[in-house]
Amino acid sequence: MPKNDHYVIIGNGPAGNAAADTLRANDKLARISIISDEMFTFYYRHKLPQFLAGAVDEDALKVRPYTVYKDNNIRMRLGQCVERIDPESRTLYLKHMEKVHYTRLLLATGGKAFVPPSLSGLHKHLTFLTRYTDALQIKPQIQAAQSILILGGDLVSLNVQQQLTRMKKTVYFALNPDSFWPLKLTPDMAARIQKNLEKKGVASCVAGDIHSITPQKNGKLEVVLDKNCAFTVDIVGCFMGLTPNIQFILGSGIDTERGVLVDDHLRTNYKDVYACGDCAQIYNPELKDYWVSIGWHNAELQGRTAALNILGDNKVIKPQKKGVLQVEGIKVNTSWWKNF
């Protein structure tokens, strides 16, 4: 007799897709559903700056064609927003009032743009790039703009700067110390990054906050930062990193802090609910504390591990060996770190 298991994954990124692939490879009969509030299929988020600049097209963003899910009997539900979880009854409540019941649930919701409280009142003047829909919306604006101020310092912001420079745009960069988490932006590090930016014709400053943004009659924005740093530009891009996308989980009884708290088997405090990827904080028995990770490889590894444990395995996820990459001449460890 076919099993009645229904594995539901919330999130359509590398963690969720790696989990779905692993579940199907090891369980040919169970129902598998991926639910995503995005309308676009699984795509390379790190290519969004190139898409924004016109260097790659929509097809180049896609990791795999939609037909793969049909061939593997995985139901892909795009544009579906989960508003609430009831782990006691194993039920998801979708925005359009539909109820979805699950046997096991995997939270792989990733992150959304982080906006510091000090910038919340200026939100309407800020531009973000965390999703395909963001890129699609602002692409015409970028094409028309002559000057752009980048506020931040995360990996995406540096990638965007490179693309804009190639487009012959006038780019200004305000290095915000808070956006370099988990790194601490030291004076030496800031000086080295600013020197590299200067070589590329990008004027920069180090500024913690935006004091004001004032629309001008010509459509431009006058931006005054702290430390007497000011620019007049067409667009202000905000790149302050990501915060876990877990708002719909709050109040469900699932333990959260910055993200969803899980043990080293990626289980939450509910035995049928797991979490992985950017939305998860994973307990490390050696550290006696929680750690988080970023990066495509880490997300896939966690997705596969969570899927195997959902199927009854007993896999332990461990912090990976340090992975180092260059960020404007600075070596950055991006494998994992504690969340201070």
Image (spheres, rainbow, N blue to C red):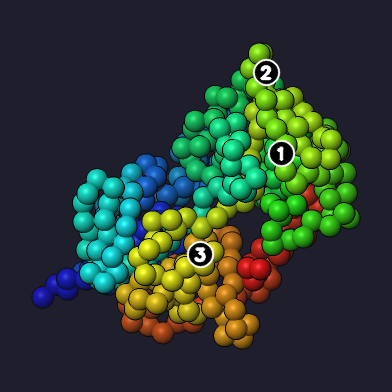
Q: From this view, report whether residue 286 is shown above or below residue 212.
A: below
User: Residue 97 location in percent, x, y?
Assistant: 22, 49
Q: Please tell me whether mark 1 sits on a helix, a strand or a loop.
A: strand
| Label 3 neighbour load within 10 Å: few <14, some 14-19, many 20+ | many
Residue 245 in view in this figure: yes
Q: Earlier in the sequence, mark 1 or mark 3?
A: 1
Q: Nearer the viewer, residue 69 or 102?
A: 102
User: Residue 273 location in percent, x, y?
Assistant: 35, 71
Task: Report whether 104 appears left or right of 314.
Answer: left
| Label 2 neighbour load within 10 Å: few <14, some 14-19, many 20+ | few
Q: Which residue is mark 3?
A: 259
Q: Which mark is on residue 69?
A: none
Assign the C terminus to one quadrant of the image: bottom right
Residue 304 in view in this figure: no
Task: Report whether 113 appears left or right of 83.
Answer: right
Q: Amino acid at mark 2?
A: Gln
Q: Which residue is mark 2?
A: 216
Residue pictured at 22% horizontal, 59% vertical: 100
| Label 1 neighbour load within 10 Å: few <14, some 14-19, many 20+ | some
Q: Are marks 3 and 2 in contact (CB under 8 Å)?
A: no
Q: Nearer the viewer, residue 314 or 234?
A: 234
Q: Earlier in the sequence, mark 3 or mark 2?
A: 2
Q: Amino acid at mark 3?
A: Gly
Q: Which residue is mark 1?
A: 210
Q: Please tell me whether mark 3 sits on a helix, a strand or a loop.
A: loop
Residue pictured at 41% horizontal, 84% vertical: 314
User: Residue 335 location in percent, x, y?
Assistant: 64, 67
